[in-house]
Image (spheres, helix red, strand yellow):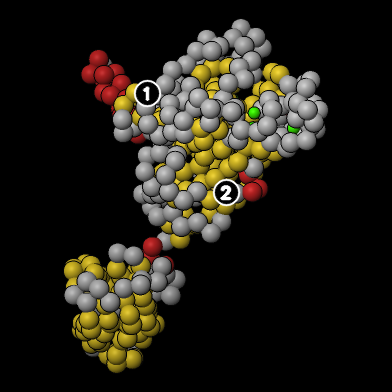
Amino acid sequence: MKQLVYTLALVLLASTAMAQYTITALNTQVTENFNGFPTSPIGGGSQGVDPANGPGGGLGETFSLTALPNWYVLRRVGGGSGTAGSPLFSGVDNGTDASGAVYNYGTAFGTASDNNRMIGSIGSSSTAPSFGTSFLNSTGLTVTAISVEFSGHQWRTGGRSDINEILEFQHRVGGGNDIVNGTWVTVPALVFNELNPTNGTTSGAGSNGPVNGTDAANRTASPISATITGLSIPNGTRIWFRWNDTEDTGNDNAFAIDNLVVTATTGTSTEQTESAAVTAVNSYPNPARGRFTVEFGLSRPEKVSISLYDLTGSERKLLAAERTMEAGAHQMEFSTDQITPGLYMVAVKTSNGRKTTKVVVAE
Ligand SMILES: [Ca+2]
Ligand SMILES: [Ca+2]
Ligand SMILES: [Ca+2]
Ligand SMILES: [Ca+2]
């Protein structure tokens, strides 16, 4: 029993260190409510551990709160005393802190619903922060669309009635263990717009200050949601999301997100993808009696296998097991013994897809 407990502890440690969410199947929700964040102390927090550089330095640091190590924070833009990419404070807050940073937001410790936590940020003249995370595609498919949903909350209202502040949403497919490098694509439908943009005055005097982000007036009435289409996330690759806050003139809003729901909605099988390496496939004679030849071209050396499929798409017979073949023209001959007469598809399969042709096996 002691051994089992010890083993479980090791497994938990290992899964924590993986620092990512995993999408295991289409139409299966991956959720995060951030309630694993601690509730106190307000103002508490520390620098995270940079995956490359260790504690306290570098770009795209892991979030400081070990309860959620798969969240990353970043000082995306600096200014004044802050340098872009330099370490970013990340701590517990209830909206009282106006310093540019990423925060674990919720009501003050000991008050109602203080265990309902969320992740958020505020921009300042020294800091435009970002926070984000990643999702590993382990569906076995190339994922082509993902729906994203989250609630939006404000923990401070800005003072400027003439500025509509936003929290921007972006994604990146693949790349390294960070939220800074590579090409990020903005999704306009997932931008969180300030809830009461005309609060305050054009000079910024007046109504800036902390508000309770769990109150109806300070959260989105319904989730912010959209389906990101046109993706191509190979199996074993991560998609990264980041939320970008911006320094705006005057006192800034504090934005937060909660109840994140991520669902891969469509994907394609590598089996159904047209192989770019196979230039042509032909089978003769057609109909085939006794024997038939499959000829095909390869534009580059490839691991190739050849299978026979029925018209429902089920594999009926492996004709040639996988082996590495040179670029150029190839011919392989097969027997029709033990193949029930009928119409089939012959598929020449490579690492990135396949190409098919029809063959009729006659009596
Ligand atoms: Ca929550
Ligand atoms: Ca405003
Ligand atoms: Ca702002
Ligand atoms: Ca500002």
Residue 251, quarter of picture: top right
**Residue at (80%, 31%) from the top-left corner?**
202
Query: Which of the numbered marks, if any, corresponds to residue 40?
Result: none
The mark tally for this picture is 2
In the image, is the residue at mark 1 within 8 Å of ligand 3 by its beta carbon? no
Give the image location of residue 358, x and y in percent: 38, 83
Q: What residue sits right under mark 1 in the picture? A: 56
- Most foreground residue, 338 or 153: 153
Identify the residue at horizontal 36%, vertical 86% (top origin). Answer: 360
Q: Residue at x 59, y 27 (%)?
A: 124
Q: Secondary structure at mark 1?
A: loop
Amino acid tagged 2:
Thr
Mark 1: amino acid: Gly
Task: Give coordinates of residue 29: x percent, y percent.
Answer: 53, 41
Answer above or below: position of 272 versus 251.
below
Q: Position of residue 48 (x, y in %)?
A: 40, 24
Q: CA distance from mark 2 to mark 1?
A: 29 Å
Residue 31 in view: no
Q: Which mark is residue 186?
A: 2
Q: Which of the 4 image quarters holds residue 221?
A: top right
Q: Nearer the viewer, mark 2 or mark 1?
A: 1
Left or right of residue 150: residue 200: right
Secondary structure of residue under mark 2: strand
- In the rendered image, residue 2, in percent from the top left (x then y), is placed at 25, 15
301 vs 32, left or right, is left
Quadrant holding ligand 4? top right
